[in-house]
Image (cartoon, rainbow, N blue to C red):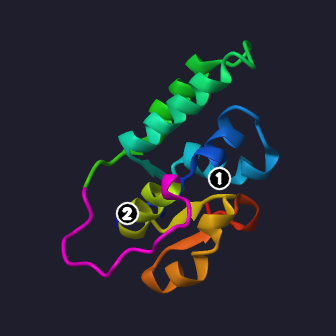
Amino acid sequence: MFRFDPPRAVLDTNVVLDWLVFANPAVAPISQAVESGRLRWVATTEMQAEMAEVLRRGLPRNPTLNTDRIWSTWSACAHIEDIPPPAGLAAPLRCTDPDDQKFIDFALHRADWLFTRDRAVLRLARRALPRGLAILTPEAWTAPPK
């Protein structure tokens, strides 16, 4: 029997917040695919640290935020891969927002999709596609077959 690895996706911080904090229904197909194993959510410790900082800043404004549930889901679903990109690859795509560069650099070498709502990242979508990376909003994505 053949076993194929599921497609790989990077979720930027806003998409993770939509899923784990706001329960945005637009992210449901992604979260269901991740939770079922049909999609592999890949991330880095740097992305995890950004999420922690966003949650830390948001706690005073939202004392009911259930960070234990958020981190439990993160631990169960995100696959941390702190692997540097292979040497000698083509020049990376440059984002106008330096805070988002980590998502693009990692996704270009480790993922099939990068889910975002960030306009600066979405502007790179056309140039990323020939490199094998689809950058799109959660609403634009069609889940892989079951």
Q: Quadrant of residue 91?
A: bottom left
Residue 81 picture location, percent across and down? 32, 48
First in sequence, mark 2 or 1: give its number. 1
- On whether residue 86 falls in the magenta region, the answer is yes
SS of the residue at dot 1?
A: helix
Instruction: Tell me the quarter of the image containing the N terminus.
Output: bottom left
Residues shaded magenta? 84-99
Q: Nearer the viewer, residue 48 or 99?
A: 99
Specify the farthest residue to the left.
87
What separation in Å lies between label 2 and label 1 (alpha carbons)? 18 Å
Main secondary structure type of the part rendered in magenta: loop
> Which residue bears the numbered disc 2?
110
Disc 1 residue type (three-letter): Ile
Specify the farthest residue to the right.
25
Q: Is residue 53 visible?
A: yes
Q: Nearer the viewer, residue 54 or 34?
A: 54
Residue 30 picture location, percent across and down? 65, 53
Mark 1 packing: few (<14 Cα in 10 Å), some, or many (20+)?
Answer: many
Which residue appears at 26% of the width and 54% of the height? 83
Disc 2 residue type (three-letter): Arg
- Horizontal side of residue 60 vs 133, given as left or right: right
Which residue appears at 72% of the width and 50% of the height? 27
Q: Quadrant of residue 73?
A: top right
Q: Nearer the viewer, residue 74 or 89?
A: 89
Residue 69 picture location, percent across and down? 60, 21
SS of the residue at dot 2?
A: helix
- Number of the label disc, if any, that sits on residue 30: 1
Q: Quadrant of residue 121?
A: bottom right
